Image (tube, rainbow, N blue to C red):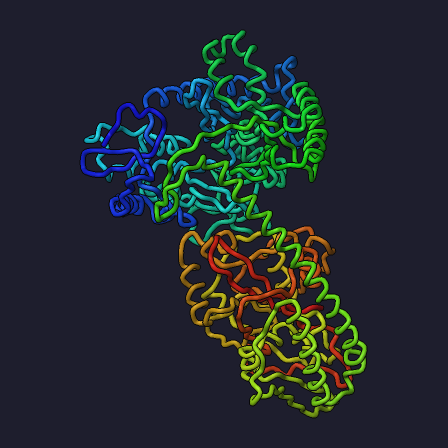
């Protein structure tokens, strides 16, 4: 039953074909909500097949009902804000009295770019003519009269498509409920949103979208929409594929062509002097964090600015959380110069969250008030100036008073400093409670959404932190005992063990295993024991050779059998003291004619040539493989026993399923394995940045890597991944042997694709390199934990 006098914002449902009613916990018809949800989800699925991270399943069929007054208030507030920001950005470098660059300092290279844009007005349109996409975010608060008012708390402008595809398709899908027959209308038509996005670029020219570390929400949906609506296929690229080449047909500041590495099916291409095949970029959009933009060369950023329809002034100025504070400080000037009316200034004063800038006199006054009264901070929060999605916000009532004052003192200097987060102070918006339906099961709850979600998140984090601290103390004690055990094992076995017989060595290892398992049990890490009637065995095959060399080999089948029954071998082989010799023949002191020839297989390259779009870490990983000629992805025709010494294995899935999965993903477009959520890779951010490179790649080794993996180019970088360093990095990050999920590890001794290898170790010596296994498991996109294993040869 509709209730025209029910004025506040509230959710509504559709109980029949002609009516609507407010959602409330009392009398909630679960069956009716299920029917409405089914109709709504069906419409959403017709709009797009690229709904990210299950957002379509979390959609609610109950929209928020508002009034024309609220709609007018929001439109008026947005128009006033738009006029104010346009004026501020226009005067940024020319109004010496306003001193905007001093009140809101940027990184030096960012200021250089914006000065270049301002000084080349013949090359770029004014900002009010090319703003791109920016979205004010608001919260709801009740004023003294009990009326709901909107408070704009920040502007999000880093990512051009963010939220718009969800909003447009969500509005369109409400057509399932015939709103017109119920006396309702869309607050905004979905087609209006989509039409605004399409006006940002020229649909007659190729479109390139640069994407970096941000996972992305709406960008994949936009690509699919552009294909359906316009018949074009925007190309998703990464920053490392961007190239600049000189253009003799152009002069001055336009004397470059902005390009990227071409795809195999690219139309018009250019071959550079270095032999790279590239395609020209005519228009571009960035989905990059500011720090990613700052890594680009200055000329690259200038040429991007000429072609980027989401303007750099939008990304670097409008998105900054200090902009709202500047607008509030400039209200009198804006009215005096007739940029906005006194009424519009009133709307902004009332509609913008009160924001205090770093280094301002208002901040000095705020610090005084906080020192006088401890609880004064409880009504305020600190927000990172370049953040988004609520990340990094500190609420005053959740921060220790001394820590709060220390953070405020650091804000007296308004400049950005490397490694330090700069904040603005905002008054906390006290949101009212609403009856909302949460999750796919439409559970009714009263909450003021954002705030309670943040508190629940912080509560869970604090609980997890306390549990982890206790766990760390327990593990530190156990690891101390293990360190003594391993030290004794090193003294008795590692230093003298090369003279031991195989039975002696294996018996010692069994004793070590028992000791390790006992320590782990003290840490509540339990393993399935070996069956008593099936003692473990290791096979050793000895072949007498002219140079008295010995070949040791572990039977693949038997080792697999062991690992399926116990986690001990996974742990023991996974330690850096593992006694398994590397199969890297380059490290053995053999004559060249004794080394096994590994045949090349050009057919692999013909079938599996892939241009990988990778993170910097994974690029280093490819480089490390190329230096040693190791294989990164396996040829589907190989068996486990044919794999070389570098493997990336996804555990807990049959190998056939893994290969089939990779094949299906690679065949999908666009294929970017590292940033594509469909590809289950893990990147260890920061690994490989601590050690200097070991040297240039050996041409023959790289050729082997290229032919085996079908990779025609491995990008260069200043410092490359070093296999020694990954263990150090994981240790520093606190990633080590822990309470792993039950699993088994498939380990096989590698051999060449052409058949079994005869890798040899000089008799009486331990090899100069060891094989280690590093286990890493993570939650990916809230899916069940997957265990990844990286097998490396430590040189």
- The residue lying toward the viewer, choosing from 555 and 30, is 30
Q: Quadrant of residue 191?
A: top left
Which quadrant is the C terminus positioned in?
bottom right
Q: Is residue 373 above or below residue 294?
A: above
Q: Position of residue 734 (x, y in %)?
A: 67, 57
Q: Is residue 232 above or below residue 740?
A: above
- The residue lying toward the viewer, choosing from 397 and 698, is 397
Q: Residue at x 58, y 30 (%)?
A: 253
Q: Quadrant of residue 577?
A: bottom right
Instruction: Kindly tell me whether residue 721 is visible in this rendering.
Output: no
Q: Position of residue 344 (x, y in %)?
A: 46, 13
Q: Residue at x 68, y 63 (%)?
A: 475
Q: Position of residue 673 (x, y in %)?
A: 49, 56
Q: Position of residue 119 (x, y in %)?
A: 60, 22
Residue occupying the far front of the picture: 26
Q: Is residue 436 above or below residue 620?
A: above
Q: Left or right: where does residue 71 sit relative to residue 314?
A: left
In this rendering, the count of numbered labels is 0
Q: Is residue 13 above or below residue 425?
A: below
Which quadrant is the N terminus positioned in?
top left
Instruction: Kindly tell me whether residue 756 is visible in this rendering.
Output: yes
- The residue lying toward the viewer, choosing from 535 and 652, is 535
- The residue lying toward the viewer, choosing from 83 and 53, is 53
């Amino acid at each position: 039953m509709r209730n025209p006098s029910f004025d506040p914002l509230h959710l509504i449902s559709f109980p029949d074909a002609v009516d609507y009613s407010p959602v409330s916990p009392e009398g909630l018809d679960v069956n009716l909500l299920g029917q409405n949800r089914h109709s709504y989800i069906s419409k959403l699925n017709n709009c797009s097949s690229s709904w990210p991270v299950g957002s379509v399943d979390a959609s609610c069929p109950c929209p928020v009902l508002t009034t024309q007054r609220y709609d007018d208030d929001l439109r008026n507030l947005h128009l006033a804000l738009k006029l104010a920001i346009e004026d501020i950005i226009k005067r940024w470098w020319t109004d010496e009295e306003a001193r905007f660059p001093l009140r809101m300092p940027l990184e030096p290279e960012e200021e250089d770019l914006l000065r270049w844009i301002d000084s080349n007005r013949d090359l770029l349109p004014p900002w009010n003519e090319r703003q791109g996409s920016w979205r004010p975010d608001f919260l709801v608060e009740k004023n003294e009269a009990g009326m709901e008012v909107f408070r704009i708390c920040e502007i999000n402008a880093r990512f051009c498509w963010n939220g718009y595809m969800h909003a447009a398709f969500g509005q369109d899908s409400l057509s399932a409920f015939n709103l017109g027959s119920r006396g309702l209308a869309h607050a905004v038509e979905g087609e209006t949103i989509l039409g605004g996005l399409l006006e940002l670029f020229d649909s007659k020219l190729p479109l390139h979208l640069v994407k970096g570390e941000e996972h992305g929400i709406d960008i994949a949906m936009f690509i699919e929409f552009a294909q359906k609506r316009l018949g074009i296929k925007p190309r998703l690229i990464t920053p490392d594929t961007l190239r600049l080449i000189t253009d003799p047909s152009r002069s001055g500041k336009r004397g470059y062509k902005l390009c990227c590495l071409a795809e195999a099916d690219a139309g018009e291409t250019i071959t550079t002097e270095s032999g790279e095949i590239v395609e020209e970029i005519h228009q571009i959009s960035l989905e990059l964090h500011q720090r990613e933009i700052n890594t680009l060369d200055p000329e690259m950023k200038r040429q991007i600015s000429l072609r980027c329809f989401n303007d750099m002034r939008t990304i670097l100025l409008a998105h900054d959380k200090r902009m709202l504070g500047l607008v509030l400080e400039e209200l009198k000037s804006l009215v005096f110069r007739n940029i906005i009316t006194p009424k519009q200034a009133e709307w902004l004063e009332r509609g913008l969250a009160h924001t205090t800038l770093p280094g301002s006199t208002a901040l000095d006054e705020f610090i005084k008030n906080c020192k006088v009264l401890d609880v004064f901070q409880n009504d305020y929060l600190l927000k990172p100036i370049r953040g988004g999605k609520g990340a990094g916000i500190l609420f005053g009532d959740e921060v220790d008073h001394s820590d709060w004052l220390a953070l405020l003192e650091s804000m007296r200097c308004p400049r950005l400093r490397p490694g330090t987060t700069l904040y603005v102070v905002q008054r906390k918006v006290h949101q009212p409670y609403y009856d909302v339906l949460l999750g796919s099961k439409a559970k009714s709850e009263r909450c003021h959404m954002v705030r309670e979600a943040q508190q629940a998140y912080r509560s869970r984090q604090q609980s997890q932190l306390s549990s982890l601290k206790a766990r760390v103390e327990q593990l530190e004690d156990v690891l101390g005992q293990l360190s003594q055990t391993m030290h004794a094992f090193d003294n008795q076995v590692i230093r003298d063990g090369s003279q031991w017989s195989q039975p002696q060595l294996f018996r010692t290892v069994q004793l070590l295993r028992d000791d390790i398992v006992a320590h782990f049990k003290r840490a509540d890490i339990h393993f399935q024991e070996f069956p008593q009637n099936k003692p473990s065995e290791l096979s050793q095959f000895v072949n007498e050779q002219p140079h008295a060399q010995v070949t040791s080999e572990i039977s693949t089948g038997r080792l697999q059998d062991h690992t399926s029954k116990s986690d001990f071998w996974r742990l023991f082989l996974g330690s850096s003291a593992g006694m398994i010799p590397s199969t890297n023949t380059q490290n053995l002191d053999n004559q060249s004619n004794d080394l096994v020839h590994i045949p090349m297989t050009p057919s692999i390259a013909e079938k599996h040539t892939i241009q990988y779009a990778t993170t910097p870490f994974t690029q280093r990983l490819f480089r490390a493989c190329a230096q040693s000629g190791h294989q990164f992805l396996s040829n589907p025709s190989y068996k486990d026993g044919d794999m070389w010494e570098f493997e990336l294995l996804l555990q807990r899935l049959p190998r056939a399923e893994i290969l089939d999965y990779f094949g299906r993903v690679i065949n999908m477009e666009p294929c970017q394995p590292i940033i594509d959520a469909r590809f289950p890779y893990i990147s260890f951010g920061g690994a490989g940045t601590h050690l200097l490179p070991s040297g240039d790649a050996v041409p023959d080794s790289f050729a082997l890597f290229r032919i085996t993996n079908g990779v025609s180019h491995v990008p260069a970088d200043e410092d490359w991944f070093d296999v020694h360093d990954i263990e150090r990095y994981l240790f520093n990050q606190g990633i080590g042997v822990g309470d792993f999920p039950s699993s088994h590890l498939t380990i096989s001794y590698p051999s060449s694709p052409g058949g079994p290898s005869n890798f040899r170790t000089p008799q009486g010596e331990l090899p100069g390199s060891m094989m280690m296994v590093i286990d890493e498991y993570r939650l990916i996109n809230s899916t069940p934990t997957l265990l990844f294993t990286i097998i490396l040869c430590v040189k």
